[in-house]
Amino acid sequence: MTDFEGVVPALRDALTKREYVELTPVQKAVLAPDVTGQDAVVSAQTGSGKTVAFGLAIAPDLLQGGDRFAAATAPLALIVAPTRELALQIKREFDWLYAETGAEIASCVGGMDMRNERRALGRGAHIVVGTPGRLRDHIERGSFVTTGLKAVVLDEADEMLDLGFREDLEFILGATPQERRTMLFSATVPRTIANLAKQYQRDAVRISTKEETRQHVDIEYRALTVAANESENAIHNVLRYYEAKNALVFCTTRVTVNHMMSRFRNRGFSVVALSGELSQSERTHALQSMRDGRARVCIATDVAARGIDLPNLELVIHADLPTNAETLLHRSGRTGRAGRKGVSVLIVPRNKRRVAERLLRNAQIYASWGVPPSIEDITKRDNERLLAHPSLAAPLEEKELPLINDLLARHGPEVIAAAFIRAIRVDQSAPEELQETAEPEPARFERGDRPDRASTARTGAPNRDEPPRPNKRKDDFAESVWFSISVGRKQNAEPAWLLPLLCNGGDLTKQDIGAIKIQPEETFVQLSAECVDRFLAAIGPNNTLQKTIRVKRLDTPPQFGGIAGTSRPSTGKPSFEGKKPKFGAKKWNGRSDSGSRGAESGPHDNAPLATTKPQGEKRFEGKRQPKFKSDKTGSGKPTFGPRTGKPKHKKSKTSKAEQSP
């Protein structure tokens, strides 16, 4: 016998039919006596039952002690969600939760026929669920009357503000009655949500469950370091290793979504895409394909996948690192819902290791670090799944025995077993061979970036007692290799864009790169010997970066100017031969710069010329003279007359107070 204290009887029956045994912590919190009828800001982990929680919380305000609703005249409750999928999902949850009350529930979301929504509102609805933009359209056109609203709920309020819906939300809240009950639900409560609550709520109660401050126990976090050019192959191997019923791959842009969808479809995966460019019917079809098993992998952007609920989602892969801790929590929260277990995998390029660790630390998440599954790992896992195949544990049926005996007599057990293995693996794509990657080393924290002891215990990063990883100095490049890159000063080459080019295109880190010597037509780059093989593998047999930049390995270190006949590199300072030059006597030659300036013959471009100043030539030593190009009066620029050289027009700098009589 279940006991749902504080739940309206009609909703209690609905929970019982859905085989609810116990309420979740957030559902119990919103039904507490001191919260009843109060405005509230509620934060809880994703998948903790927030939708049912606010459905239970507003029921007493709507039913007013009754068990069923009267005929609908004007909407009594408004639920606002950031995306179409989440709004429609909330409507589905409310359909069964309020089934015993006779509630009419209408949805107003972008991408759907507005005329049908207008007719549904005209027939009468007790509860309206929608997205901010479409709801504002209905209010402005008069099809949605808000004067009778008793409760307003903002679900995923932080995401709505991040998506730029602040103006729409303020308009909607401003059109509702002042005496309404307002509840804000979100996985996180940043400062923007707190400011919104102060403006539109009255004495709001802050509710946060104990689980909010702990890592989600049903989600296993893994961070896998990969070469920058092998992220797709690593994702492929992760999908093959887990073979999840449903997997969700997050990307940051629509272009990446479309690219990865075509790549994985070509590799034999049943995959669908979810991005903002799809119509509502296409998005609904994609989600339904995931729910009924026609598709196993969904590749989506953050906004498109916000709030979606897939019951069999067991794996979340972050193909691109989230931009902040809140996005990481929302992405990962698509799995591990309603007590089910899930895995969240971050694909971390080696040069983004510190970014990923800072992200995990800010989210207060501990992740186990490792490398992507290898071919051997996946083969071993495939064998384990095959030996545990359900068909092998099924009992024999009597009608199958004649065929079984016939097969054994004709082919033998070995041939039959081999045929079974091939039949099981016929649709499985071959694992990808990845570059051998060492296990990730602890990250090195610079001054001001070192975490405290509590945070390092959560993230697995080194604590203060562990010696920091030494930084590479010049002595560390005693064993190094020089490369020539086919861009120089004339092509506007500079370290600011050469470093990212080498790190991203050459699978390097900043610690792998030594000196960068920019010459007029080429640039010499010094790399540590231990990363040379990795660099050559990343640039490929054509030895190119970004298709047009050629790379050449040098057999000996390059020479950077200096005195003719010597091999010693120049220090970048002129040779005075024991005496300092007398400035004003003559110019000095032979300077070469071993830094960002190259070695050219003759005087240096920036060398000070010791020529005497011509007589009668005035040197300007004050503010730079303005360039006067216009004679037009009223242009705001001073213009000189033909004789006097005095300005005809000059903008007055006197204040308005001085100008007034």
Image (tube, rainbow, N blue to C red):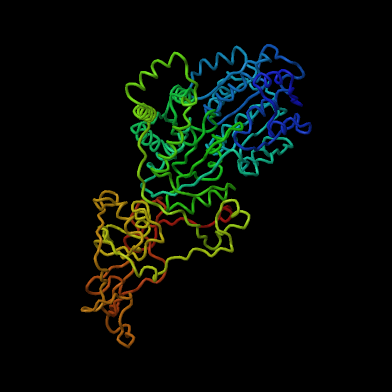
Q: Position of residue 535 (x, y in %)?
A: 32, 55
Q: Is residue 529 visible?
A: yes
Picture layout, residue 653 above or below residue 370: below
User: What is the x, y in percent for residue 185?
Assistant: 64, 34
Residue that extends furthest to the bottom in the rendered view of this protein: 578
562 up-or-down from 243: above or below: below
Q: Left or right: where does residue 613 sit relative to residue 116? A: left
Q: Quadrant of residue 279?
A: top left
> Which residue: 60% across, 11% down?
123
Pick the front one: 27 or 138: 27
Residue with the most extreme front position: 409
Which quadrant is home to the N terminus? top right
Q: Nearer the viewer, residue 572 or 502?
A: 502
Q: Is residue 170 visible?
A: no
Q: Position of residue 271 (x, y in %)?
A: 41, 30
Q: Is residue 595 above or below residue 566?
A: above
Would you identify the image quadrant in which residue 210 lies?
A: top right
Front one among 140 and 393: 393
- Compared across the picture, whether 223 is left or right of 644 comes to right
Residue at 53% across / 52% down in the picture?
358
In this view, 541 is above or below 185: below
Q: In the depicted view, which residue is nearer to us: 117 or 392?
A: 392
